[in-house]
Image (cartoon, grey):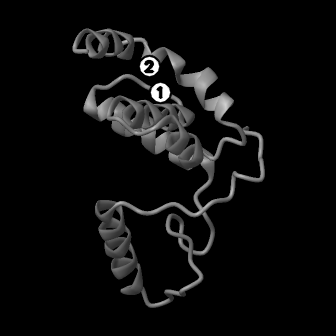
Amino acid sequence: MMETTKKSNRVLPIPKRLLESLKTLKTNAMKKKYFKESWFVFGDELPFRETTIQVRKNKYCKLAGVKQIRIHDFRHSCASFLIQNGASIVLVSKYLGHSKISITLDTYTHLYENELKKVSNLIDTL
């Protein structure tokens, strides 16, 4: 289980694609006779148990023929994707809710090794 810090609870912008998916989920849920606005996004009156999410993840990984990873690894994949696509380490750290940027740097510094060649090329252009 992850450690909770002051920065664990934060407000993040929701990508348009995700927002549309959430709206569709709510529209479908509202069709149920006993729908309530207080429902959870996944699980209706009570949130899904973590084991439910793991079972579904494992099922769909198997169907897709992809490697099984832990739920937490999706977080690492997201951070790696952001860094590899030019997001600053400061923003990635805030997005992940790390209490210190050093945590993010210690975890993801290896992703910047390819950037060293870019630095060298940049200096060569001077």
Measuring from the top left, give residue 36's x and y in whole percent.
Answer: 54, 87
Question: In this rendering, is residue 103 above or below 4?
Answer: above
What's the amino acid at mark 1?
Ile
Question: In this rendering, is residue 59 above or below 126?
Answer: below
Tell me which residue sits at (28%, 34%) in the image: 63
In the rendering, which numbered label is found on residue 90? none
Crowding around mark 2 (Cα neighbors within 10 Å: few <14, some 14 to 19, many 20+) is few
Q: Quadrant of the N terminus?
A: top right
Tell me which residue sits at (77%, 53%) in the image: 6
Q: Which residue is at the far front?
A: 126
Badge 2 marks a residue whose secondary structure is helix
Crowding around mark 1 (Cα neighbors within 10 Å: few <14, some 14 to 19, many 20+) is few
Question: Which quadrant of the structure image shows residue 65?
Answer: top left
Question: In this rendering, is residue 90 above or below 83?
Answer: below
Measuring from the top left, give residue 40's x and y in whole percent.
Answer: 56, 71
Please state which of residues 86 and 65 is positioned toward the viewer in this rendering.
86
Location of mark 1 (residue): 69
Question: Which quadrant of the structure image shows residue 82?
Answer: top left
Badge 1 marks a residue whose secondary structure is loop
Tell me which residue sits at (57%, 64%) in the image: 11
Location of mark 2 (residue): 111
